[in-house]
Amino acid sequence: MKYTDITTELIESDKSIPITMSFCSLKNIDYIEKEFIDTYLNMNEKDYYNKLKYDARKISFLLGRVSSKRAIASYVDSKDYQSISIEKGIFCNPIVKCNNHNITVTITHTKHIGMTAATKELYPIGIDIEGIDKHYTKAIKTQLTDKEIQLVEQHSLGAEVGFVTLWTIKEALSKVLKIGFLTSLKTYEVERIEGNDYCINGYYKNFKMFKSTTYKIEKYLVTICYPSKCDLKLNYETVYNAIINDL
């Protein structure tokens, strides 16, 4: 498994709120050794992992757990991954158990890349990573409002990238709210997008207390949703290098 850990921050007025992020990649489960499993997974997690039958599910589980534990460990300045536990809330949102630290995490992954961001529980954030695939463009378009389709048509992104961009912006918000897509997608409607073809800022119609930033990295889109009263200090080059290092 390859991984890259980075630190960034939210700025609220003159206050800095650190965010630690971990990017991991894994394409072949055969590369994972017992020592690696023993380092990152506690007893319950190992039991669950060993019961998984399919390699794809094992890869998915490890991407989520390893990226989460690395991001959290970096946040609390520790290498004791065994003391960190990630549980599921009633809506399958991640709940952190880590020596009474009040930390929130947001997790996302594609087929081979996992990504987690950790920060103070007081500052909810959400992340999403999606591959750009023309085969999904038509399906995504059916889930967008007429206004959102018009936004894409007016922007230079093009349909293939633009529709997936809006999807990631909505997905990231759903993780902030900790309920996923358990309500109408129209609720998450994107009101406005701005920026260039590589870094796009998104704004929501019904959730003006949040905004998002999307980074286009080769064939991937990475979106972070965060409180609109804050500024995200994460430049394009940092995200680009993290993704490219893990490909």
Image: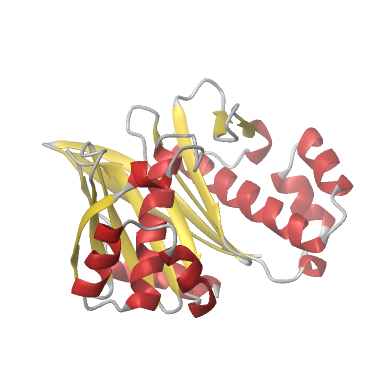
- The percent position of residue 239, horizontal first and vertical second, equals 37, 65
Instruction: Specify the color scheme.
Output: secondary structure
- Quadrant of the image occupied by residue 155: bottom left
Q: Closer to the camera, 117 or 198? A: 198
Q: Identify which residue is drawn at 47% across, 75% down.
A: 244
Q: Is residue 131 left or right of residue 59?
A: left
Q: Residue furthest top?
A: 100
- Asked if residue 228 can be seen in this view, the reply is yes
Q: Identify which residue is drawn at 46% across, 37% down.
A: 183
Q: What is the quadrant of the C terminus in the image?
A: bottom right
Residue 171 drawn above or below residue 15: below
| Count of all numbered marks drawn on residues in the image | 0
- The percent position of residue 224, horizontal first and vertical second, equals 35, 52
Residue 57 drawn above or below residue 211: below
- The percent position of residue 35, horizontal first and vertical second, equals 80, 54
- Quadrant of the image occupied by residue 193: bottom left
Q: Residue furthest left?
A: 13
- Quadrant of the image occupied by residue 150: bottom left
Residue 104 drawn above or below residue 184: above
Residue 62 drawn above or below residue 247: above
Q: Is residue 247 left or right of residue 215?
A: right
